[in-house]
Image (cartoon, grey):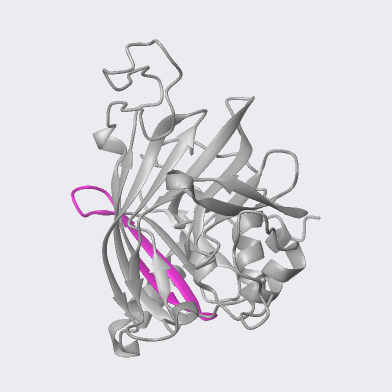
Amino acid sequence: MGRSAFYSGLAVCWLSVMPSVGFGYVPSLQEIYAELVFRVPAVSRAIIETRVIVYETGSNGAHPRDAGKRAVKPGEYFPAEATERGFQQRIYWIRDRLLAIETLNTAGDPIHFYMDEGLGEVAGDLTGTRHFEPVDVRHPYIPFMAGSLNGWLKGMEQWGVYPTSVRLRRAYKSKFLYTLTDGEGSYAAFDPKRLQLKRIECLIEQSGQPARLSIVFGGSHIYGGKIAREKLLYFPRTVDFFIDGKLVKQITLLRLRHNPSLREFPLIRLRKSARDLIKVMPPSLAEHDIR
């Protein structure tokens, strides 16, 4: 998302037995994990198009009504858009088989390529003017579509969330969220009924200083048709990234085609792009037998 990634350096109970959600009930971590085992969306393939806006992090602008009289909450901060750092993405996803991401600038020119078919990531910049880390281009919701507990755990671990307990957190309109937390301030928050990811909070390093990253998943499109609720795919319309309460990035869903034919996945082209990228990548130390 520009020459330096804003987070570079960052490093559940079966449905039949799960008690009704109530203000006083908090399931155990083991119950949540047991429930997640059964949350396998009927959508197993998707082609996703997104638009990503990057905001100026150095400005101190805020909504006019705040007038500097109180702290600005996430969602109330309106910095200037860094238009030259925005980008678009085409994401190809097949559960347990493929994640490929083509990142394009606002003019539609390729600037980064990412691909993982289960044997390791191939990722690299396609220009000399913009740099991306894999965490910059991977949509943060993708791991939570995996339909496996391991996928959910990896999705949280990517942001340094290693849960040890479950707590209730008050949300909008007197509703509550389950938060899977490490007890140190990092957590992932889920809707109790859908177990849909709503928010991730964690600590990162920025310019050598600790900072708080908040990832907020807004709204959702529902895919899967008229099937059981736990088999539906809820995909966020927007994802907002805040650092210390300041909006720095927003991902907007433009289009999602669910369960398209395998013929619609340009595997030959994607694999050629991966091979071409490997040819120009600098050799690793391991390739030179340097340990």
- Give the vertical position of 166 relative to 32 (above or below): above
Q: Is residue 198 left or right of residue 104?
A: right
Residue that lies at the very extreme toward the right in this rendered image: 291
Residue 2 showing in the rendered view: no
Q: Is residue 184 left or right of residue 175?
A: right
Q: Residue at x 66, y 63 (%)?
A: 153
Residue at x-position 43% and y-position 36%: 3
Image quarter where the N terminus lies is top left
Residue at 21% across, 54% down: 108
Question: Does the magenta segment cover residue 47?
Answer: no
Q: Position of residue 196 (x, y in %)?
A: 50, 63
Q: Is residue 196 visible?
A: yes
The image shows residue 272, relative to residue 261, as above or below, that is above
* Nearest to the observer: residue 252 or residue 269: 252
- The quadrant of the picture occupied by the C terminus is bottom right
Residue 270 pos. (x, y %)? 38, 74
Q: Quadrant of residue 11?
A: top right
Depth check, front residue: 2 or 160? 160
In depth, the one of 56 and 271 nearer the eye is 56
Q: Which residues are magenta?
A: 91-110
Rendering coords of residue 258 (x, y %): 33, 79
Task: Report whether 33 appears left or right of 62.
Answer: right
- Residue sitting at x 37%, y 81%: 267
In percent of width and height, residue 281 lies at 51, 57
Left or right: 96 as drawn, with respect to 232? right
